[in-house]
Image (cartoon, grey):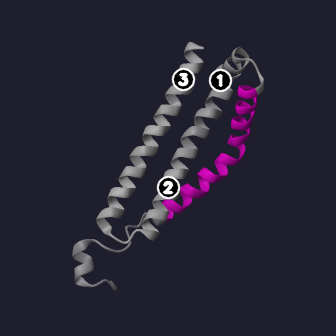
Amino acid sequence: MDYRSPLAKVRGLGSAKTGTFHWWMLRVTAAALIPLSFWLITFLDLSIHAPYQQTVDWLASPLNTVCIVAWIVAVFYHAALGLQVVIEDYVAAEGLKIISVWVINLVFLFLAIAALIAVFRIVLVG
């Protein structure tokens, strides 16, 4: 039985059946960020206290590179999902809501790509 009004059916308003996936991705990325954040803390500690070449050597290790890259991907995806929820909950105008979500997703995609390029440049160039 469908409880939506005919106008809501035409506009496509109502459940898009993607809320569960969104909720799970927020939880999965949050759980992944807990152990991955230890690599970030170690990297930041090395960046502050160790010589540059030691930091580069540490980051060039395959396990450390993969963990930092995984942290970057998880943190930007998690942040984009979280801000999307905030926008969907607190922005009333549909047009502004859609544009805001797109802008947030594009900004976080750009920031993630910039961070990944920086990591790979450090690893490859030194």
Residue drawn at (56%, 57%), measured in percent from left and top? 26
In the image, is 48 to the left or to the right of 93?
right
Q: Position of residue 63 (x, y in %)?
A: 68, 27
Dot 3 surroundings within 10 Å: few (below 14), some, or many (20 or more)?
some
How busy is the neighbourhood of tag 2: few (under 14 within 10 Å), some, or many (20 plus)?
many
Badge 3 vs badge 2, beta-carbon distance below 8 Å: no
Three-letter code, disc 2: Leu
Judged from the image, the secondary structure of the residue bearing numbered disc 2 is: helix
Q: Quadrant of residue 3?
A: bottom left
Q: Quadrant of residue 73?
A: top right
Q: Characterize the magenta stretch by its predominant secondary structure.
A: helix
Out of 15 and 123, give the one closest to the viewer.
123
Earlier residue among tags 1 and 2: 1
Q: Nearer the viewer, mark 1 or mark 3?
A: 3
Q: Nearer the viewer, residue 16 or 41?
A: 41
State the residue at coordinates (50%, 55%).
81
**What are the residue bounds of the magenta stretch?**
20-48
* Mark 1 to mark 2 CA distance (whole Å): 28 Å
Contact (CB < 8 A) between labels 1 and 2? Answer: no
What is the spatial separation of the Cα atoms under label 1 and label 3, in whole angstroms? 11 Å
Q: Based on the displayed image, in which of its 4 quarters is residue 61 positioned?
A: top right
* Residue in front for this viewpoint, 63 or 48: 48
What residue would you read off at disc 1?
A: 62
On the image, the x and y values in percent for residue 25 come to 54, 55
Label placed on residue 120: 3
Q: Which residue is mark 2?
A: 81
Note whether 50 is above or below 90 in the view shown. Answer: above
- Callout 1 amino acid: Pro
